[in-house]
Amino acid sequence: MDALDLARWQFGVTTVYHFLFVPLTIGLGIFVAGLQTAWHRTGNEQYLKLTKFFGKLFLINFAMGVVTGIVQEFQFGMNWSEYSTFVGDVFGAPLAMEALLAFFMESTFLGLWIFGWDRLPKKVHLATIWAAAIGSNLSAYFILAANAWMKHPVGYEVVDGRARMTDLWAVLTNSTALAQVPHVIAGSFVVAGGFVLAVCGYWLLRTRAEMWRRAARAALLMTAIAGAVVAGTGDHSAKLMYEQQPMKLAAAEGLEHDTQGAGFSVVPGIEIPKLLSFLSTYDFEAPVQGTEDLQRRFEQQFGPGDYRPDGTVVFWSFRVMIVFGLATVGLSVLGLWLTRRRRPFPAWLSRAMLLALPLPLAAVIAGWLLSEIGRQPWTVAGELLTASSVSPGVSVAEVATSLTIFTLLYGALAVAETVLLARHVRKGVEERAPVQAAEAPREPSLMY
């Protein structure tokens, strides 16, 4: 295994681990803001208890996400200097906007929310959690815009071997980004909804408290709606993939040769006739390009080389994403139906809700693998090969050392995260949530 392979493994390991926290932060922030809004509007103390309970889970996850995300930036300089040199003038703009605008907004207002329970008026304090949650989603937008540029580069020109931005607006409104952003954010709401469902399922097996039923119903609704958005935006993304990334589409379907009226492969050996052509173009007879024919065309266009991604990983990642995502959304729809008109949660449904934690996480990780491995062998599609992106002076020993250190460090962080979350979940809500100082005298909150 050479330095390139190790550098790819390191970036993949650290990014997958970091991405476990990102969707939960995006979705859970909105959920906590919604709970606090419900308390503000109704005065029901149950919503205040839930706000503080899930708020602390949100903070634990947010802190871990920040820690693991910092490592990503170091890798650009350590292992991918040629990539950084090529894309820096373009890639740096949305990342700088993310750090200076979105993350600053998110972290600042989150700090005000943490320490403002006893010091800010009720409405102002509510606004801080909404600002922090919006900042998380805005942060995702800028990062996804940068990522989308790598798959479909626009608004640039190559000067002296480097990409130079010519149109920032084109980068930020890239058609790939406009499809990818709502898809990822909706998927994040599914992850957050699944997390809340698992926590509520744990407590509904121990108590019939109305508070947990309220939270579970809200999570079921959020997951079902977000799932519908994921399906719609995923359909749109598939059509863009047909136009912009035909090799990824062919690999995801295991299609080797150009086919008129291509079928959708459920699993190897089981195919739905002509469905792939319809999903790609709304035309059952539309031609779909295959990996082997695309390989020959790319060799003529870009020169000798293997332009096919790892077909096994891309093929099965696509199916894991679909199956696990549908299972989570199906559980939420079923749960909404079974608990309509204030019907109690059956014990078996509460147990099934525990699966809502790993299933959507596996789905979003599989989606990330499909997206990034499917782009290979390019870091910037049509412009920069991954093999040409790695730092020229880095050795196998150096990358292996940093890979080992980061893997051990992230393993320790995973244990710490799991222990902290599990301890807080088992502890449950405060017996009595204090009333905010703006309304009545109260003791200082020790929650945070």
Image: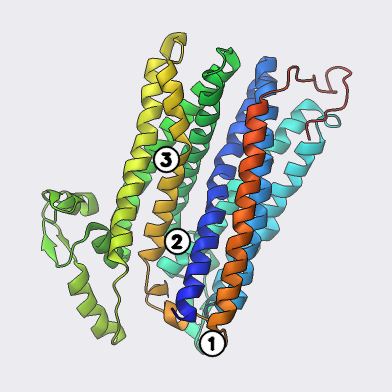
**First-in-chain label (2 vs 1):** 2
Under tag 2, what secondary structure? Answer: loop
Q: Residue placed at 56% from the left, 76% from the top?
A: 399
Question: Callout 2, which amino acid?
Answer: Asn
**Circle 2 or circle 3, nearest the eye:** 3
Kindly identify the amino acid type of the residue bearing the numbered disc 1. Answer: Pro
Q: Which residue is mark 1?
A: 392
Q: Is residue 360 left or right of residue 318?
A: right
* Visible residue check, residue 54: no
Whole-number angstrom distance, CA of label 1 to CA of label 3: 40 Å
- Kindly identify the amino acid type of the residue bearing the numbered disc 3: Leu
Q: Position of residue 374 (x, y in %)?
A: 35, 64
- Picture quarter containing residue 60? top right
Percent across and percent down for residue 391 are 55, 83
Q: Which residue is mark 2?
A: 174
Q: In the image, is 381 to the left or to the right of 121?
A: left
Residue 323 higher or lower than 13, as above or below: above
Residue lying furthest bottom = 160
